[in-house]
Image (tube, coloured by chain):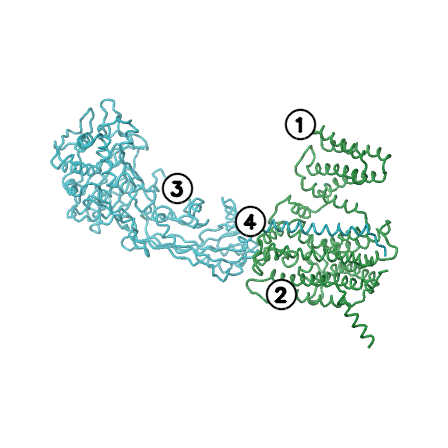
Chain colours: A green, B cyan
Amino acid sequence: MELQQQNNTEGASLLKSVDWITIILYLVLIVAGAVSIYAATYNFDKSSSMFDFSGFSGKQFLWAGLSFFIGLSLLLIDRRLYEAYAYPIYAVMILLLIATIFLAPDIKGSRSWLVFGPVSLQPAEFAKCATALALAKLFGTYGFALNNWKSYAIAVGIIVLPILCIIMEKETGSALVYTSLIFVLYREGMSGFVLFAALCAITYFVLVLKFASVMIMGIPLGMFIVFIVIMVLIVGMLAVYCRSFILTRNVLLGYLGAGAVAGLLAYFGIVINGYAFFFTVIGVSILYLLYGMLHDDMRKVLLTIGFAVASIAFMFLVDIAFNNVLQPHQKTRILVTLGIEDDPRGVGYNVNQSKIAIGSGGVWGKGFLNGTQTKLKYVPEQHTDFIFCTIGEEEGFVGSSLVLIVFLALILRIIVIAERQHTTFARVYAYCVASYLIFHLSINIGMVLGLCPVIGIPLPFFSYGGSSLWGFTFLLFILLRIDADRKSYGSW
Amino acid sequence: MRKDYNLEKRKFVIAGFIVVLVMIYIGRLFVLQVGDSKYKENADSNAFLEKTIYPSRGLVYDRNGKLVVYNQPAYDVMMIPKDVQPFDTLDFCQTLQITPEELNRRIETMKKGRNYSAYTQQVLLPHISAQDYGRLQEKLYRFPGFYIVQRILRQYNVTCGANVLGNIREVNQSDIDRDEYYRPGDYIGDLGVEKSYEKWLRGRKGKEILIRDALGKIKGRYNDGANDVTPIAGNDLHLSIDMELQALGERVMQGKMGAIVAIEPKTGEILALVTSPNYDPSLLMGKERGNNYAALIKDPRMPLFDRSIQAAYPPGSTFKPTQGLIFLHEGIVDLTTAFPCHRGFISGGMRVGCHGHGSPIALKPAIQTSCNAYFCWGLKRMLENRKKYKNINEAFEVWKRHMVSMGYGYKLNVDLPHESRGFIPNAAFYDKIRGAGKWSSYSIISDAIGQGEILATPLQIANLAATIANRGYYITPHVVRKIDGVGVLKKSIERHDPTVDKKFYPSIVEGMRMAVTGGTCRGANLPGLDVCGKTGTAQNPHGRDHSVFMGFAPMNDPKIAICVYAENSGFGATVAVPVGAIMIEKYLRGQLSGGGEARANRMSATSTYSTKAYGTKKQGSKSPKPVSGAKASTTTAK
């Protein structure tokens, strides 16, 4: 009797303390997703019911119903179990990922699906949850802090292990998802410099490749621009990071002077070789900084010098890697995405058709089930990776923006949830969920809109497939359970 | 728990990142969906396949209800190169009974085509047989990217009348620009009634809107066919042409360049419209059209040039009746007025030659004998009549108005394309080329005998014969009597009454009758048919004189008016008169008598193709010879 009473109060308090906003956003997305799949796979010839279990949408509704049931069950599990079993769960998942490499049949070159009769599951989707729990557990360990190389090594190791397994399964897209956990590391104390460096690396990469064909001063325009960006960043770092007025002024004047001399010579028809010019100018400025740091904060100036050298090295590395290391099809994919190559029938076909489908939607869209592009299969993978096309075509600018806003709301809500946690475990876990969602949303939508390379990853809750749906359901409901208990933990 | 507020601020960086990213994506959506309409157009052409259903083109019947032009379906094998997937080439070739090499050759040819595109339907094999079509149709599902399009080919029951019938060809870009009805691959009438009655013959295309998926597979009819359009067949034409007469005309004109125009005077219906040399209309049909067309274009005798309505010739003496009518109407002469002719018109230092006949001579015998001097005197007297006209310009303008009212100088608006307007000069024209006040009746005297600057089409000359036969009026000549379902077009039966008083016509008729019974065209004197006629021997800059005949019969109930124009064939009596007689006899009697048949054989065996190269100038005997420095007025008007 007393036990039952306790259970009742626990049930009631769960209903009260669970984050209903997240549940509502989740339900909105999941229903919109299944309806979109119905629209995407709707056949003009023989229309079937939305809930016909032989169709994609029927199955998706089944998956969705089951996942909601699973979600509710997860809410009933004591949160302590997640924390306690985080490592064993992680270990089992890694083993499963490794087993998958050998057990999975080859489906379009990828060995990531385990087939159980009519049902196929992709362990990589569930490994996200395990990795998040393990990372959270690590950070939650008493005394753990990202302040020594050993901590970094363990944290990065937890992230990299599933990446390696999944790359071996030839699912590069799913593997890349884990790189988003850099946000978690950043939030938990990793230097912002790493994020800055990553941003610089991406910028250099794009610039070098995008402007590789035009030559200026005997070097590709891309490299020319990157050299100038590096010089600007050196001056910026000296000013903002080192806060040294004298160094900033002297280096800036030096660069401007050299630029003026080169410009004047070019005006009179004397063109200096670009490499010679930039190496001389940047080299001289580095020598000057080595001399100047004796009077200043040595560490910060050294870092600036290191940054300059690493930037130049990276730039050449990109050039060499792109031309000598990447496979031709990978090169084309990157070039098409950067808008350097136009190939609407080849690699660019998906993206071009997807832009046509979305673009044809207009402001209000063509109306539910009235899209022609997606239904007539002009857009490949329309019910999986390119599901957003159907929304764009049928629901127009208004509908597709709304979907993006709901996603944004969910992600921001998860960040709010993360920040209100009292334990590091809970906060890190929440940030993991947010990071995964950020990555999936930005890459999937970016690819459909022709802004990112075509990396085959699903749009959470929308793309057809039980694994992805269940994976995100696990992630979300475990978070909800942990969040529901936040008041009982760590509030000391 | 350690709470680091410095680190907590980093939530703004992460949240800011995703907020900015979503805003960029919404901006991108805005550009794609609201900013740019090209995606919408792309989408429609992606998904909808508008299949045109060609209507049956109108048939063409001749005067006697005989079917002349009809349709035969033909099938083109089309392919959309980008949709073609690997297929059983051998099976495909066997079905169409071609060799794989032939197929490769065809594909190569197709790819070299001017409008080749891998994304649109290209003609692979034009005009396959119905049997091949049947076999291929059954197997078509095995060959994605291949289609069969039904075309309509014209078939001709006759080998004559190509200039009247015309033909059909594929539309070109300028046709499409001019009329939005046409789409690439459509057919349009070219030449003849196919062109001038295109609007009625073509009917209205239908269309079927189909939904097509990315593989080009048809997924059904759009909107259950509610937006489809049923094709409407073209209207049939009934020609006024008598195909037997036409065939005879083409036969007797063999070996000669020129034209025959025969008109039923009361109705303006054209009975025969012969141009020579000509060609079999079937040449411009089907696969070989292009080659044949090129050959016809290159032929120096210009068979595609319809001399009956497009050639502007000097009408020569056939022009004289008009002059007689004008002089009578203007009171310049009466039937008793006689002018001297001493083997020509000799006055004011110039001479226009003539031939032996009595002198002085009055109008009717002047027509009978085709006296040049009479008409020169008449024109001189009219242009110099200062009591009636202020000056020569006014007199000449009066003359010109009469001429125009008789159908000269402007298009008669026959219902065929590319009609020439001929040429009748006016006073302003002479003011311009000779200088105001610098021309006189002498310098333009050859106009009186259908030379000088005067140019007329054989149709205009035949129309004059019809006008005289009708004693003073004509109906716009036309080749189509009736369009099924539409009736008679009003503009093709318009009655015109020339300005000359009708009471003067009978005298001209008598003169023309006298010419047949005892004058220049005795060769046309067919017993019992009362032919009236007028010959012409038109001097021209291209060589030997043109032989011309104009006439009608029977005299008192004219059923046929005719003009025969044979280039470089000498006197009117040599070729044009016998040809005219054959045509009149055939039409009025239904068949040729033994003598007529012999004459027809003789005529068809006569060749007068100029042996001289075009452009050599020859002075004819009738050209006004300048005696004292006046420039020869034989230049052809520009």
Chain bearing mark 2? A
Give the residue displayed 27% in from the left and 41% down from the top. B458
Q: Amino acid at mark 2?
A: Gly
Q: Position of residue A346 (x, y in %)?
A: 62, 49
Give whichever of A27, B489 is nearer the camera: A27
Horizontally, residue B304 falls left or right of residue A459, namely left
**Alpha carbon distance from label 4 to label 1:** 44 Å
Q: Position of residue A110 (x, y in %)?
A: 71, 56
Q: Amino acid at mark 3?
A: Ala
**Pointer 2 residue:** A55
Q: Nearer the viewer, mark 2 or mark 3?
A: 2
Q: Amino acid at mark 1?
A: Tyr
**Pointer 3 residue:** B295
Q: Position of residue A368 (x, y in %)?
A: 58, 60
Give whichever of A178, A426 is nearer the camera: A426
- Residue located farthest toward the right when viewing the structure as drawn: A143
**Considering the numbered disc 4 on the image, is that residue within a helix, a strand or a loop?**
helix
Residue A131 visible, this orientation: no
- The answer to whether tags 3 and 1 share a subunit is no
**Considering the numbered disc 1 on the image, is that residue within a helix, a strand or a loop?**
helix
Chain bearing mark 1? A
- The answer to whether tags 4 and 1 share a subunit is no
Residue A41 visible, this orientation: yes
**Mark 1: few, some, or many residues within 10 Å (few <14, many ≥20)?**
few
Label 2 vs 1, first from the N-terminus? 2
**Pointer 4 residue:** B38
**Pointer 1 residue:** A267
Given contact means CB atoms under 8 Å apart, are the residues at marks 3 and 4 in contact? no
